[in-house]
Amino acid sequence: MFDTLDDSNFLLFAAKFYDNPGADLLEFQEDLDRIKYIKRLISKYKDGRELRARLILNHIIIMYNVFEPKACTRILAFRLYEYMDCLKPFLLYLNYWPERIEPIGVNQEVIYGSDIQMDMNIISELRKI
């Protein structure tokens, strides 16, 4: 059913792998909104502002607490595809980066970890934590 993750099945995919007993629709949406917060924080960093590594880590950790880990990685990779160079160091730091990420997007692209370069400044900041 979820051979690929794209816009047409994103919400269904996220709901299927959401594991927060007792949560309502509002909480589910709030947890998905964390992707927007992460994207905004990384975008600001890319625009030359401060890297808020701990805040990004906190949002990512919360997401992995409420979504099944493999699915959460696909969700983040799909929504933050243009920031993979920034996302990968955080997921490696948390030991969530896989060797490959199952197909995402319209092109059904499989992402191989070895193909993604990492932002060296983010690596440096994470080493300080």
Image (spheres, rainbow, N blue to C red):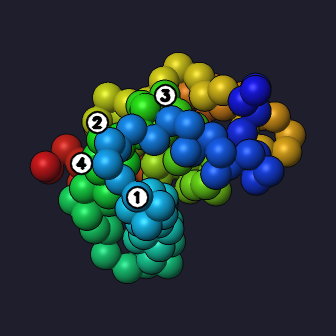
Q: CA distance from mark 3 to mark 4?
A: 22 Å
Distance from Cα at disc 3 to Cα at disc 1: 23 Å
Instruction: In the rendered view, tell whether residue 129 sits above or below residue 24.
Output: above
Q: x and y percent of residue 50 in the render? A: 31, 75
Gap between marks 1 and 2 measured at Cα: 27 Å
Residue 58 in which image quadrant: bottom left
Between discs 1 and 2, the one toward the N terminus: 1
Q: Earlier in the sequence, mark 3 or mark 2?
A: 3
The percent coordinates of residue 7 (x first, y second) are: 76, 53
Residue 7 visible, this orientation: yes
- Tell me the SS state at disc 4: helix
Instruction: Report the residue marked by disc 1.
Output: 24
**Comes first in the chain, label 3 or label 1:** 1
| SS type, badge 3 | helix
Query: Looking at the image, is mark 3 or mark 4 earlier in the sequence?
Result: 3
Q: Earlier in the sequence, mark 4 or mark 2?
A: 2
User: Which residue lies at the image location 55% right of the left edge and 28% below the top edge?
Assistant: 113
Identify the residue at image location x=65%, y=45%.
12
Distance between the alpha carbons at the discs numbered 4 and 2: 10 Å
Residue picked out by circle 3:
70
Of badges 3 and 1, the one in the foreground is 1
Q: Which residue reaches farthest left?
A: 129
Q: Which residue is mark 4?
A: 126
Q: Are marks 3 and 4 in contact (CB under 8 Å)?
A: no
Q: Which residue is mark 2?
A: 94
- Amino acid on which the number 1 mark rests in the picture: Asp
| Gap in angstroms between the C-alphas marked 1 and 4 | 34 Å
Residue type at numbered disc 4: Leu
- The three-letter code of the residue at mark 3 reads Lys
**Tags 3 and 1 in contact by the CB under 8 Å rule?**
no
